[in-house]
Image: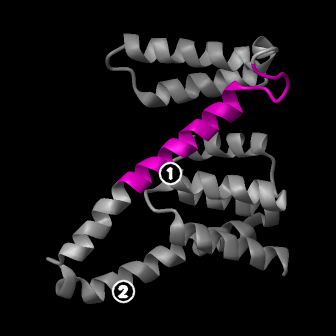
Amino acid sequence: MNTFLLMCWEFFKTGLFAVGGGLATIPFLKEMSIKYGWFTLDRLTTMIAVAESTPGPVGINMATYVGYEMFGIPGAVCATLSLITPSIIVILIISRILDAFRESKTVKAVFDGFRPAVVGFILAAVLSIYQTAMLNSTGTFPAQFVEMINWKAVVLYAGLLALYLKKDKLHPLVIICLAAAAGALFSF
């Protein structure tokens, strides 16, 4: 299959199954990285950082970023449209039949079942980000534990977390800017 069409198909599937918001797209992007080699896991971490620090929904920012990296502006547009198309279709269908199922116990039970699954998806994404950011690929546990840790990232994280917890009214944008500056300065 043509790589461009394959990218669109993968983002369509991601949009269809990534229930719970932008962070729920991260496991799908990790799978794309492993399955197709379109980007490395380190590159994925960079994409997450850029998508989180730019305005707009994270999932859409990620799709736009990956599409642009792969195929320029046409790739960015098509990846973004591929990601949001399933949501648009589902919303159109649901809006047509919502009144008939508004009080359905089955529908309520399905959505109640989605909630823990969404939490699991987001938790898996967070753990994956921490693993990629905080651990080096070298070293084995427990023999070379010290070499496994990305100490610069751990110190940066601890410092920014301490600053955030100490300052009551510190805006998250300040933390994002400080992290970006430290990353650029120390070549993360």
The color scheme shown is one colour
**Of all residues shown, which one is farthest toward the front?**
142
- Which segment is the magenta one? 116-141
Which residue corresponds to the image point at 46% horizontal and 48% vertical from the top-left? 120
Tell whether 86 sits left or right of 82. left
| Residue 94 in the image, given as x and y percentages of width and height | 32, 82
Which residue is label 2 attached to? 93
Q: Quadrant of the C terminus?
A: top right
Front position in the image: 167 or 98: 98
Is-magenta flag for residue 110? no
Sort mark 2 into few (<14), some (14-19) or many (20+) by Cα contacts within 10 Å. few
Which residue corresponds to the image point at 74% horizontal and 20% vertical from the top-left? 150
Q: Quadrant of residue 137?
A: top right
| Residue 158 in the image, given as x and y percentages of width and height | 55, 14
Sort mark 1 into few (<14), some (14-19) or many (20+) by Cα contacts within 10 Å. many
User: Which label sits on residue 37?
Assistant: none
Secondary structure of the residue carrying tag 2 is helix
Is-magenta flag for residue 140? yes
Secondary structure of the residue carrying tag 1 is helix
Tell whether 18 sits left or right of 68. left
Q: Amino acid type of disc 2?
A: Ile
Q: Amino acid type of disc 1?
A: Phe
Spatial separation of the CA atoms under disc 1 and disc 2: 25 Å
Tell whether 98 sits left or right of 126. left
Query: Which of the two discs, 1 and 2, sits closer to the camera?
Result: 1
User: Which label sits on residue 121?
Assistant: 1
Residue 57 in sight from this viewpoint = no
Q: Quadrant of residue 25?
A: bottom right
Q: Quadrant of residue 10?
A: bottom right
Residue 35 in sight from this viewpoint = yes
Front position in the image: 13 or 156: 13
